[in-house]
Amino acid sequence: MTTSEYNQIVEQYANRLYRFILKNIRDEERAHDLVQDSFEKLWRNYRDIGFEKAKSYLFSIAHNTMIDMVRKEKRIVVSDTNEMPETSHSRQYSDLKEILDAGLKQLPEMQRSVILLRDYEGYSYEEIGKICQLNESQVKVYIYRARVFLKNYIGKMESVI
């Protein structure tokens, strides 16, 4: 990758990367720091990375750095449980975005990441797999579980509207 290609990557993906990280950690300053760290790591390895692979490499770096930071700060282990909590949101709201954001906060880290990459950023299953270091089947399972949880969390649409 050349310097001009690196600059093109920065222009194309800085905002998308920032939005992805911000949706996950909900802290603007830390999101800016993680974006900066991700681009720094990309720059350190720019000779080894082709221009066509830079996007998935960049998002993989950002995702892994974000997970490491969250684990370090909260001292929790990210694990996938087979059990989905049976919660339902019963209050009447007219703002679906608030309810979805609250539901997203309750998802396990990996499910939240894949659902944000798929439904908010529009990545393909293959791209999400590369970013999160999962195979395509695992990505689909995480997305399915996250959607089922969010559906149960929201409850009936009539109570939301």
Image (cartoon, rainbow, N blue to C red):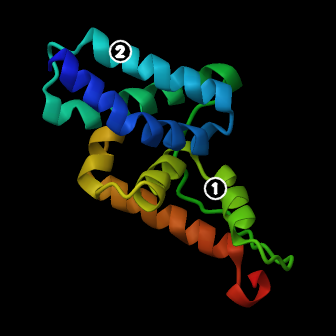
Task: For the N terminus, give its image quadrant.
Answer: top left
> Residue 70, can we see it?
no
Residue 153 against residue 53 in the figure, above or below: below
Residue 136 on image: x %, y %: 26, 54
Amino acid beneath label 1 = Leu
> Which quarter of the picture shows residue 44?
top left
| Secondary structure found at label 2 | helix
Q: Is residue 113 visible?
A: yes
Marks 2/1: CA–CA distance: 28 Å
Residue at 48%, 19% in the rendered image: 36
Q: Residue at x 52, y 29 (%)?
A: 66
Horizontal arrangement in the rendering, residue 48 relative to residue 21 (left or right): left
Picture coordinates of residue 43 (x, y %)? Answer: 30, 14
Q: Which mark is first along the chain, 1 or 2?
A: 2
Image check: 90 left or right of 60?
right
* Left or right placement of residue 27 versus residue 50 in this view: right
Going by the numbered disc 2, the residue's amino acid type is Lys
Residue indicated by mark 1: 104
Q: Is residue 23 above or below residue 147?
A: above
Q: Which residue is mark 2?
A: 41
Crowding near pointer 2: few (<14 within 10 Å), some, many (20+)? some
**Total number of numbered discs in the rendering:** 2
